[in-house]
Image (cartoon, grey):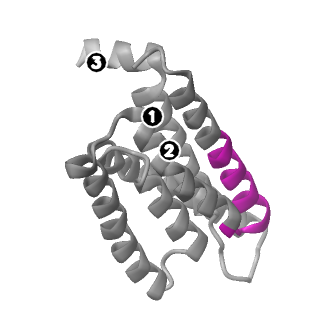
Amino acid sequence: MLDDPFKYGLLAGLAIALLIAGFTDLRTRQIGNWLTGAIALAAPLFWWASGLTLWPGVAMQVGVALAAFAVLAGLFAMRAMGGGDVKLLTALALWIEPEWFLRLVMMMALLGGVLTLVFGAWHVTRRRKDRLAIPYGVAIASAGLWVLTVHYWPPVAVASSVLG
């Protein structure tokens, strides 16, 4: 696991894509389809580099992504989540192991809550009358980067497996 440069190159590419997603969502409140598409299309390369078997490995990744999309599409329909956020989180579900994807969602919710408080306070202090728009892609990208660091980055992954 620690000596596969192709796998870690893919993870570095994912980290860069997450940084781009977070920054573009912060600036424009949009996450490009080209970016979420690239993340989703690169997932099979990561599966191959990770030695994931078709059954149950790949099937589980696709199943979690489909389940995430179904739930998130419902949130989008209720106007509780943006379309770019739905696509980004679904694409991430193709990369992250199911147990760690659940951790990602929990971290995203915590970070999203903090982000909402910060943007809400800024909105009130500026006496803005327009609708509050939260760049939730920042929370998604931050949680994704957290998972990549804790679970996939070799020194941290080894330390976390030793500690618990």
The residue to which callout 3 is attached is 161
Q: Marks 1 and 2: in contact by CB < 8 Å? A: yes
Give the number of the disc on residue 45: 2
Assess disc 1: are there few (<14), some (14-19) or many (≥20) residues with their C-alpha within 10 Å of its C-alpha.
some
Q: Are marks 1 and 3 in contact (CB under 8 Å)?
A: no
Q: Secondary structure at mark 2?
A: helix
**What's the magenta bit mostly, secondary-structure-wise?**
helix
Q: CA distance from mark 3 to mark 2?
A: 25 Å
Which region is colored magenta? 16-33
Toward the bottom, the furthest residue is 77
Identity of the amino acid at label 1? Answer: Ala
Instruction: Identify the image quadrant of residue 39.
Output: bottom right
Amino acid type at circle 2 is: Leu
| Of the pair 81 and 112, the residue shown nearer to us | 81
Which residue is labeled 1 in the image? 49
Give how far apart the Cα atoms at labels 1 and 3 are: 21 Å
Q: Nearer the viewer, residue 4 or 136?
A: 4
Q: CA gap, disc 2 to disc 1?
A: 6 Å
